[in-house]
Amino acid sequence: MGRKLKVVENNKKHLTKAEKAVREDVQKKAGDGLAELQLTPPAHLGKIAKKEYKRVVSELQSLPIRDLDRAILENYCTWYGIYIEASEKVSEIGVSVYDDNKGMWIQNPLVVTLEKATNNIKSCAAQLGLTVDSRMKMYMPKTEEKKDTMFDKFGG
């Protein structure tokens, strides 16, 4: 399996006209032939998730993300909503809570929820091109480093 293809406009490699035509055709089939992402958030998303959907969907129009990718976007928005709600509660209650049954301070269970939400947000955001790193990978041509073998070093 070869490396991931880049959008033709972002490819820094000098391609022949034939190579460019093939890649444009692949790009067109991967994106343009499919339904666009809907601009309005789905009804089943929460209030915060809907707001985040509206914020990012306009930016995603410039990337080859289509309706088939909607589940990842909805997942990202849902986890973002969970993150915001849990973060607000942790700010109110604190990181540690007092357990009357044991008479000691314990970690707030919402901290685990925050950690889980953070990891899921990072994962979805990277898949959608919402992180600086994932966008840089789209624009940065990969250089393939060839390791020297014994035959290269000594001939043979």
Image: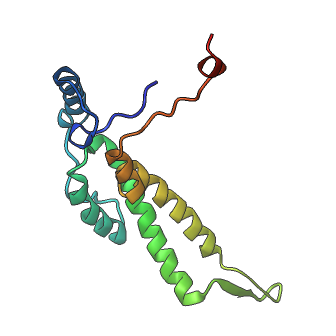
Q: Position of residue 106 (x, y in %)?
A: 74, 81
Q: Position of residue 72 (x, y in %)?
A: 39, 49
Q: Position of residue 27 (x, y in %)?
A: 23, 33
Tell me which residue sits at (68%, 84%) in the image: 96
- Residue 51 in the image: above or below residue 87: above
Colouring scheme, one of rainbow, by chain, secondary structure, one colour? rainbow
Q: Is 23 on the left or on the right of 153, as rendered?
A: left
Tell me which residue sits at (36%, 52%) in the image: 136
Quick one: which residue is furthest to the front in this view?
154
Q: Nearer the viewer, residue 89 or 21?
A: 21
Question: In this view of the protein, can residue 5 be seen by the observer?
Answer: yes
**The C terminus sits in image quarter:** top right
Tell me which residue sits at (61%, 14%) in the image: 155
Residue 115 placement: quadrant: bottom right
Residue 80 placement: quadrant: bottom left
Question: In this view of the protein, can residue 131 be seen by the observer?
Answer: no
- Residue 104 in the image: above or below residue 3: below
Tell me which residue sits at (19%, 20%) in the image: 18
Quick one: which residue is furthest to the top in this view?
156
**What count of labels does the image hold?**
0
Q: Nearer the viewer, residue 79 or 131?
A: 131
